[in-house]
Amino acid sequence: MAINVSGNNYQPQQAERRNANYASNPYYVANMPTNRFARQPQADTYVPAQRREQQPVQRRQQPRAIGGGSKLQTVATVAGIAASTLIAASLLKSSSLFNKKQTDAILNQIKQFDAPEKVKTKLYEAHRKMSNSVMDADSAKNYIDNVQRLSFKDPEIKAVDTKKARAIMDEELTGMNKVKDQVINFLEERNYNLANGIKNENGPLILCLDGPPGCGKTSVAELIAKAMGVPFERISLAGVSDSMAVTGLPQGYKDAHPGEIIKAFQDAKCKNPVILFDEMDKMGASREHGSPAAALLDVLEPKQCKNFTDKYLEFPYDLSQATFIITSNNKANIDKTLLDRVKVIDMKAFTTGEKETIASKFLGKLFGGSKLEEHGVKKFTDGAVKAIVENTDDAGARKTIQNCKDVIKQAKVDIQRGAKGSDIIIDENYVNKALEQAASKITK
């Protein structure tokens, strides 16, 4: 007996006889090889019609299992579903998000939350997702928290005491008289509109402070907020190239969140803060999500800012009562459509005399808080102040302030190493040595 390549018994004579008997029958079945490695197909099989009628195929009358599988597979599937259901139920009971008291407390917070009906509708939808869906629970809870951090109450706007504001700026800022005059004029116009019931139909108050690094732009913005008696928030735009930084990341994305503007209003907890857009001239643009400068048009555009819609929140929020201040080192790099909507105040570099005044004030402040005088160190000389300024090469005052810090730091280090305070004289020579040592440490 021979064995064919498919592993079956092979009898040539029987195969020829069977093929001869079935050759005249029109019924044909192609019998493909069961072994995919067979080198030749098996012989085709011919089944006579009379034989099929005499011996009909007997089908099994067994009930089919669910899903087409066996009974064992069906039992395993049902058991798996039951186990996963029990696990999910236990997780729901153990999770604080799905605790009935917890969800009821959140629902009461939503009912008591002072917000427009459109906003509350969004919160109710998020609450239903949180209560009914395991997959959406965390994102829905985060959404509710983000919305409730916003204030929807109209603020009580008060007039600014411009004399007090000028005194604060004179004390905190050296020079910059023209800048101070323009800021006071800006606040006086605001007071006039408020006193005469003139609403700001042109949108929020917007200033642009343009000047070299370190010339006090951020300090001016902070003092404006202090004079107005409102919170101050800063948004850095340097290197920002994605519009979603302004408009937010929509729900459905992983780690979805509001944009930087809404975050600033959340931190301020009011609708009329002073918000600083720092270094707007250093923004970029994204091919995928668009330019942040284009997104800022909705913020600075009078008709659009009242209905600014963050993509994460999905409802409009009024920005018109805020005060926006833009800073830049080169206003030529700011989009012209944005620049047309703001009042520009040019801030120039500090003169040598202004730097010496800044150095004297700041060095005195540092010296008073260092307790060096208790160790016998005499107060710094005028030559020390001049030496500090001579070792600067910037247009602003940052290098001047850093030099003051390095000098006081060196005096502390010398005393800690055993030097007598009475032997330390902060003069021109001491300043030069201290700054030289500080520069060598940076080089190393």
Image (spheres, rainbow, N blue to C red):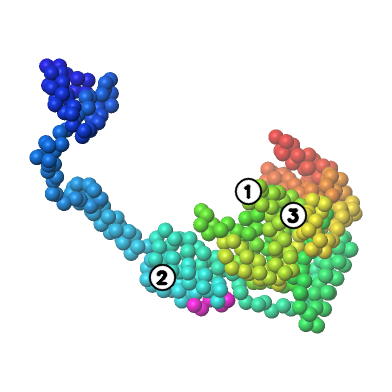
| Residue in view at x 65 percent, y 54 percent | 243
Q: CA distance from mark 1 to mark 3?
A: 20 Å
Residue type at mark 1 is Glu
For image coordinates 63% across by 69% down, the residue present is: 317
Residue, disc 1: 288
In this rendering, the answer to whether 336 lies above or below 25 is: below
| Residue that sits furthest to the top in the current view | 1
Query: Taking the image as drawn, is residue 94 in sight?
Result: no
Real-space CA distance between mark 2 and mark 1, rounded to the nearest whole angstrom = 40 Å
Q: Nearer the viewer, residue 105 or 80?
A: 80
Q: Which residue is mark 2?
A: 102
**Residue at the spot of label 3:** 280
The boundaries of the magenta stretch are 111-116
Crowding near the residue tagged with mark 3, few <14, some 14–19, many ≥20 C-alpha atoms within 10 Å: many
Badge 1: residue crowd in 10 Å (few <14, some 14–19, many ≥20):
few
Position of 57 with respect to 266 (left or right) is: left
Local packing at callout 2 (Cα closer than 10 Å; few below 14, some 14-19, many 20+) is: few
Point out residue 112 in the picture as x, y percentages from the top left corner.
51, 78
Residue ID at (38%, 72%): 101
Asked whether 87 falls inside the magenta stretch, the response is no
Tell me if residue 315 can be seen: yes
Discs 1/3, front: 1
The majority secondary structure of the magenta stretch comes to: loop
The three-letter amino acid code for the residue at tag 3 is Met
216 is higher (above) or lower (below) than 6: below
**Amino acid found under the numbered disc labelled 2:** Gln
**Callout in the foreground (2, 1):** 1
Q: In which quadrant of the rendered view does residue 336 lie?
A: bottom right
Q: Is residue 387 left or right of residue 7?
A: right
Residue 203 point in image, percent of width and height: 75, 70
